[in-house]
Image: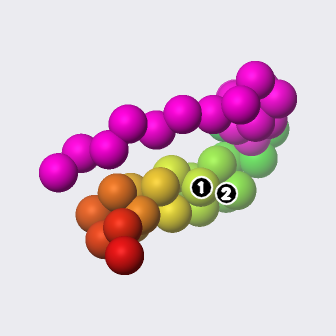
Amino acid sequence: MSRRISFGASAYKDFNQWAILDKKTYQKIITLIEDINRLPF
């Protein structure tokens, strides 16, 4: 089951900045989102 992921405006801006400036943090966030999506509880 795939869940819809939503970000607040400032969180989305931060997320995009990490994609550019801090790829390690960005990848950790992606991994966390994937894990939550796969095993939500």
Residue furthest left in the image? 1
- The colour scheme of the drawn protein is rainbow
Q: Is residue 17 above or below residue 31?
A: above
Residue 12 inside the magenta-drawn segment: yes
Q: Which residues are magenta?
A: 1-18
- Looking at the picture, which amino acid does disc 1 mark? Ile
Please indicate whether residue 40 sits to the left or right of residue 12 in the image.
left
Name the residue carrying label 2. 24
Query: Where's the C terminus, which quadrant?
Result: bottom left
- Name the residue at 54% across, 34% down: 6
Could you tell me residue 5's position as x and y percent? 46, 38
In the rendering, at what x and y percent does residue 4 appear? 38, 36
Decide if residue 17 is in sight here. no
Question: Residue 35 falls in which quadrant of the image?
Answer: bottom left
> Is 28 left or right of 17, judged from the image as shown?
left
Q: Nearer the viewer, residue 13 or 5?
A: 5
The CA span between labels 1 and 2 is 9 Å
Q: Which residue is mark 1?
A: 29
- For numbered disc 1, what is the local secondary structure? helix
Look at the image and say whether residue 10 sits in the magenta stretch.
yes
Based on the displayed image, in which of its 4 quarters is residue 9 positioned? top right
Residue 1: percent from left, percent from top: 17, 51
Q: Report the amino acid beneath label 2.
A: Lys
Dot 2 surroundings within 10 Å: few (below 14), some, or many (20 or more)? few
Nearer the observer, 15 or 9: 9
Q: Look at the picture and state if 41 lies above or below 28.
A: below
Q: Badges 1 and 2: C-beta atoms under 8 Å apart? A: no
Q: Quick one: SS at disc 2?
A: helix
The residue at 59%/55% (across/down) is 29
